[in-house]
Amino acid sequence: MRDRAVPVGRKAVRLTPLARLPLVLALGATVLLSAAGPARAVDIPDYQAALDVVRSAGVHDAVCRFLATPLPGAGSDTGSDGVVTAPDTPEPCAGLPAFTLKDPLAVHEITPDFVAGTALPVPTEAVRLSHLVSALGAAVNDRTATVLLAPTEGGGWHLAGVRDGDTDAGYAGSATPGSLVFTEPQIRGWYRLTLTTVEPLNDQARAGLDGRSAVPLADYQKLVKARYADKLPGTEYDTRGMSSGYGPDGPATEPSTRTPLLAGGSIVALALAGGAAALGRLRRRRRGTA
């Protein structure tokens, strides 16, 4: 294969095939990031399906049940680690003010190959779409909430749960044209990724970058490889049953109409029975690798 000359002004620079590879990858990443930004449909497969789920009567009723149920541990000294059954009433929204949900936003997370160091440090290899979030348009009775959507096998989305607060949606919505936002769930760190630079968005992320305001994506890969590479599926850590992290997700189950549960802990969520598996994966990722 002959080298190709690329004109630069009046001169030409000759690129070998190996030298052209990073350029091709960088151009591909540029295309990806140029479309990134809050609520961009291009970020989300089956975006209209996600909108339909968020605007459905079933999700609206699920949010009503969540808002009508006291948080686990409220008014006690037991914290928020309890589990209670949400009321399954025929009129779950009775007595609640009218509310709307914002358009769904993409939540990305770092990929297993990126953590292992086998993927190149480019955006298309470093992160993947994890799930969608949609927050309340405004607080209801002084409470905020976020709907979690998980991908359904064969395409589309379904309700995985409802979480107290709107922090995740706030971070997901901070993506700008030319950047995307991703999470390092093991430390609950949120970052903004431009073409080659990782910037922290919260204190956990700043600690994850050793206090630096930004690092090259390649340097960030070294950090997460040191933290988690020995805990990936197939490692001794995993085979001993301690890993919670980066294995491929199993097929998502279809939504169910069974009575939802309100689960306490680090992510307070109302999980429909059909979304329990997907929500469980989200919880395991957020609890960390230990």
Image: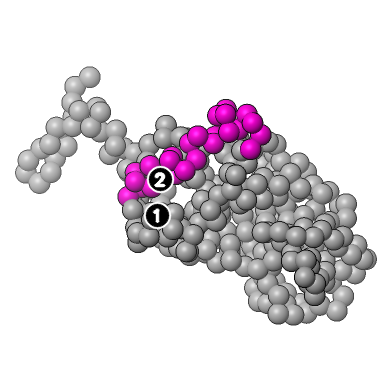
Vertical side of 94 occupied by 192: above or below: above
From the image, which quarter does the N terminus lie in? top left
Q: Name the residue nearer the viewer: 34 or 85.
A: 85
- Extreme right residue here? 90
Asked if the residues shown at circle 2 and circle 1 are in contact, with their CB atoms under 8 angstroms apart, the answer is: yes
Residue 96 left/right relative to 2: right
Is residue 49 in view?
A: no
What residue is shown with label 2?
Answer: 223
Q: Give the range drawn in magenta.
A: 216-242
**What amino acid type should be assigned to the residue bearing mark 1?**
Leu
Image quadrant where residue 102 sits: bottom right
What residue is shown with label 1?
Answer: 209
Q: In terms of secondary structure, where does tag 2 sit? A: helix
From the image, which quarter does the C terminus lie in? top right
Image location of residue 36, percent across then percent down: 45, 55
Image quadrant where residue 81 sits: bottom right
- Name the N-terminal-most of marks 2 and 1: 1
Image quadrant where residue 120 sits: top left
